[in-house]
Image (cartoon, coloured by chain):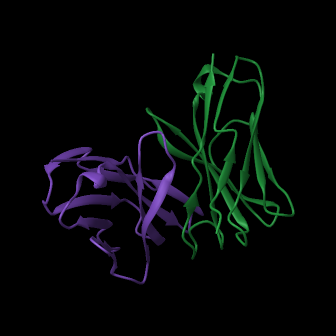
Amino acid sequence: KAGVTQTPRYLIKTRGQQVTLSCSPISGHRSVSWYQQTPGQGLQFLFEYFSETQRNKGNFPGRFSGRQFSNSRSEMNVSTLELGDSALYLCASSLEVAGLAGELFFGEGSRLTVL
Amino acid sequence: KQEVTQIPAALSVPEGENLVLNCSFTDSAIYNLQWFRQDPGKGLTSLLLIQSSQREQTSGRLNASLDKSSGRSTLYIAASQPGDSATYLCAVYTGTASKLTFGTGTRLQVTL
């Protein structure tokens, strides 16, 4: 059974650019959530999608957005990149709404560097 | 606002030792608690999931307990091995906030 797949694994952008990250959940999982991990702030919740609907959103500016497709694949987009957006972006999938009943399974992450 | 703290922040032990990692949370209205390990530069690997109605879960050399009323969980690792070296994170799902909140992590090093 394939795990959670995130692409790209590594990317470098410059300030002001935008970036789109992709996440393919485990087959059959309908919930996808996104997290940002930085050395200073640790793991912070970005948002969660379930059946193409955003269910929850963390405390991030509107530059951070996401969506989920009918096949449960999800994308997140960050516009007008800032240096502080450099981080490891992790995607997780589960069978139910994140954590409500099911176990979370994480991808390897997308490491974004903003220069 | 849910806050999750893990103590100690770092731990170094010789191979073979039994050890305990601690996780505390401020809001006891949780649905579940999950323990993860993270290797450098990698994603998170799920170790154990404890539902709010459960007191403990076991998997191999790992045992996690949950005391919801006191806002605490412990992860017990028996007979530690160098391969256990990683950062261990606990996370709680809080119904009122409907989101997963992660702890600060414990960086474990098991030496030969």
Number of marks present in the image shown: 0
Q: Residue B55 appears at what percent x and percent y?
A: 33, 81
**Residue B58 in which image quadrant:** bottom left
Q: Residue at x 68, y 65 (%)?
A: A26
Q: Residue at x 29, y 49 (%)?
A: B85
Which quadrant does the C terminus of chain A fall into? top right
Question: Which chain wears purple?
Answer: B
Taking the image as shown, residue B110 lies to the left or right of residue A81, namely: left
Can residue B97 be seen here? The reply is no
Where residue A13 sits in the image (x, y, percent)? Answer: 70, 21
> In the rendered image, which quarter is residue B40 located in?
top left
Residue at position x 70%, y 17% in the image: A14
Q: Is residue A40 left or right of residue B73?
A: right
A3 and B25: which is toward the camera: A3
* Residue B22: % across, % down: 26, 59
Location of residue A104 (image quadrant): bottom right
The residue that appears at 24% across and 65% down in the rendered structure is: B77
Q: Which chain is green?
A: A
Is A5 located above or below residue A104 in the figure?
above
Q: Nearer the viewer, residue B15 or B103?
A: B15
Q: Quick one: B27 or A12, which is closer to the camera? A: A12
Q: Residue furthest right?
A: A70
Who is closer to the viewer here, B24 or A30?
A: A30
Please state if B31 lies on the left or on the right of A100 as rendered.
left
Residue B39 coordinates in the image, percent (x, y): 41, 46
